[in-house]
Amino acid sequence: MRLDRIEQQLGDGPCLEALQTLSPVLLPDTGTDTRWPLYSKALTAAGSKSVLGVPLPLGEDSSAALNCFAPDTGLFTDGVINEATVFAGMAAQALSLAVRISATELLVADLKSALESRTVIGMACGIIMEQNNCSPEQAFTTLLTASQHRNQKSATLPT
């Protein structure tokens, strides 16, 4: 996390480039690579000599990437990069599923809340209709007017 934070604070580095290009980005040697001088210097001081940024393809609305750090150069071979890319693809599927489940749970909670509010509003309209001998539309208009004047949601108005 400490090493990842360096890139986040600087706003530049291989992981962020991987997010933009949607391709793995290798910083093979923090001592000789000149693309991100501040980042390379900070990583070297923290004990990392090589970094691999791998994007996680999540779709249009989300993005993520993995930062893989190595204490020495030459550890990110083509085979390791391929394995990291395969792992990122699997991780992206799991993360996408988790995001969809979370979004579905939020939607369910919103729908439950809406149904509860609808029931309360319907009961309030029924009371207004009985008390004022009016139509459902007139009762709902009365409820809306009271809600607006009191700056309070209709479902929470006292009846």
Image: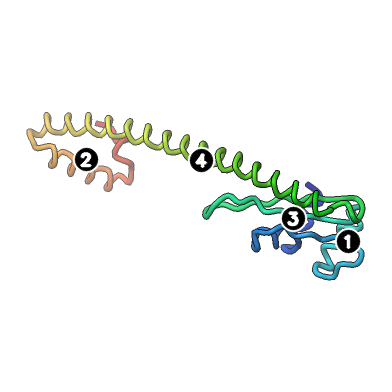
Query: Which class describes the residues within 10 Å of circle 4: few (<14), some (14-19), or many (20+)?
Result: few
At horizontal 19% and vertical 34% (from top left) the residue drawn is 125
Q: Residue 117, located in which quarter of the rendered image?
A: top left
Local secondary structure at mark 2: helix
Q: Which residue is mark 1?
A: 29
Q: Is residue 2 left or right of residue 142?
A: right
Q: State how far apart marks 2 and 3 are (Cα).
A: 56 Å
Task: Work out whether mark 3 precedes mark 4 in sequence or the reverse, and give the earlier one.
Answer: 3
Local secondary structure at mark 1: loop
At horizontal 65% and vertical 42% (from top left) the residue drawn is 90
Q: State how far apart marks 4 and 1 are (Cα).
A: 38 Å
Tell me: residue 46, above or below residue 34: above
Q: Between label 4 and label 1, give the one nearer the viewer.
A: 1
For residue 100, the mark is 4
**Viewer-proximal residue among 94 and 147:** 94
- The outermost residue toward the left is 133
Q: Quadrant of the C terminus?
A: top left
The amino acid pointed to by label 4 is Arg
**Viewer-proximal residue among 101 and 121:** 101
Q: Position of residue 27 (x, y in %)?
A: 82, 61
Q: Is residue 10 left or right of residue 32?
A: left
User: How many numbered discs sit on the rendered protein?
Assistant: 4
Local secondary structure at mark 4: helix
> Mark 4 touching mark 2, by CB under 8 A?
no
Q: Position of residue 9 (x, y in %)?
A: 75, 59
Q: State how far apart marks 3 and 1 are (Cα).
A: 14 Å
Q: State how far apart marks 2 and 1 are (Cα).
A: 69 Å
Q: State how far apart marks 3 and 4 are (Cα).
A: 25 Å
